[in-house]
Amino acid sequence: MNLNELLPAVEPEELYAPVMAEITGIRRLTAHEVFYRLELPGGADLGHQPGQFVEVSIFGVGEAPFSVSSAPTLKGAFELGVRKAGMLTDVMTRLQPGAKVGIRGPFGRGVDLERFLGRDVLVVAGGIGLVPMRSLINTVRDRRDEFGRLIICYGSRTDADLLFRDEIAAWEADPDIEFHVTVDRGGEAWRGRTGVITTLIPGLELDLARTVCCVCGPPVMYRFVLLALRSKGLKDDQIWMSLERRMKCGVGKCGHCQINASYVCQDGPVYPYTELANLQEAL
C-alpha cells in the first residue's frame, strides 16, 4: 500500500485532503536544516520517485512543499530535509518525535529512471539541492547492478553548511562512488577543495556516450553548470534539471509555480533540459 491508495480517489477535491503522518526520527544537519523520518498510517509506502515532493501541513500554521529525500527503496517510511525559512518551518523544527503532520502527495514529475538505467549517472547538487538528489543517489546505490558509474559533485556555501556529513563520509569511502565536494568559502579547519561547484566539472573523466546528468541547486547555479556540462561534451538531451519554485497547491490550480505555460508542480520539478530550453523564464 502507498499514500495514493490511502487517499480517496472519487472526487478531485480529495487531492486537497492530507493524510496524517507521524514523525519517528529527527536529526539536525546544520544550524539551519533539520532531517525528518516520517511514517504513514499502517506503514504504507509514500510511492514516490526521486525528485518528487510532498506538501506538509501543520493545522493552524499552514502548508509548504518539501522534496522527498529518501529513496523509493526505503519501505514503510520516508524522509524530508527542512530548512528553517518561514513560519511553518519554524514550528516544524520545534516538533518532537511522535508529533503528526499532514501530508499530500507525492506530486510532480521526478527523475525518469527508465532513461537512467544502464547509464553512468552524474549528480550535480548545490546547497539544499542535495536533499532531493539524495533520493536519486540512494536509489542508484540500492539498485546498483542496474546502473553504471555513480559520480557526485556537491557544492556548499561553507564547510559549516555541508549536509549529510555522515553519509558524505560513507560516499567518499565507497569504491563504487566517485564523490567530489567543494565549498565556496572554507573555514580554518577545512582541508578540502575551495571554489564554486563548476570548478569540479572540468576534471571529471566521463564516458560521454553513456552519461546522464541530473542537476539541482540554487537558481543562480543553473546557467553556469549548464555551460560547464556542455563544455565537457554533454548534449542537451543528456541533462535533467530539478527546479525550485513555490509550489503551493501541488495540482496545477493556483499558478504560483507557473513558468510560461508549464506548471512546475505537475510538469516538473525535474525537467529534461530539452524542455527547459523552450521556457524563457525557467533559468
Image (spheres, helix red, strand yellow):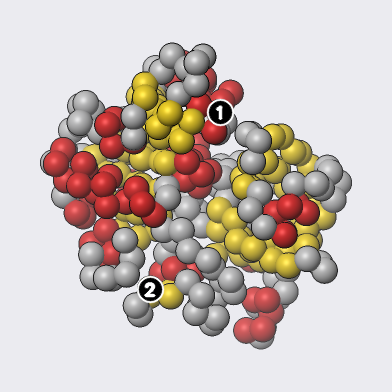
Q: State the image quarter where residue 37 is shown.
A: top right
Between 243 and 122, the residue placed more toward the observer is: 243
Q: Is residue 59 above or below residue 215?
A: below
Q: Nearer the viewer, mark 1 or mark 2?
A: 1
Between 105 and 229, the residue placed more toward the observer is: 229
The alpha-carbon separation of the residues under discs 1 and 2 comes to 34 Å
Number of other residues with Cα within 10 Å of mark 1, as a class: few under 14, some 14 to 19, many 20 or more = some
- Residue type, numbered disc 1: Ala
Q: Which residue is mark 2?
A: 259
Q: Is residue 230 above or below residue 104?
A: above
**Label 1 secondary element:** helix
Residue appearing at x 66%, y 49% in the figure: 84
Left or right of 106 on screen, residue 219: left
Q: State the image quarter where residue 1 is shown.
A: bottom right
Residue appearing at x 14%, y 41% in the figure: 231
- The location of residue 6, given as percent across then percent down, is 71, 66
Q: Which residue is mark 1?
A: 160
Number of other residues with Cα within 10 Å of mark 2, as a class: few under 14, some 14 to 19, many 20 or more = some
N-terminal of the pair, mark 1 or mark 2, is 1
Left or right of 71 on screen, residue 259: left
- Residue type, numbered disc 2: Ile
- The location of residue 10, given as percent across then percent down, is 67, 83
Q: Is residue 139 above or below residue 242?
A: above
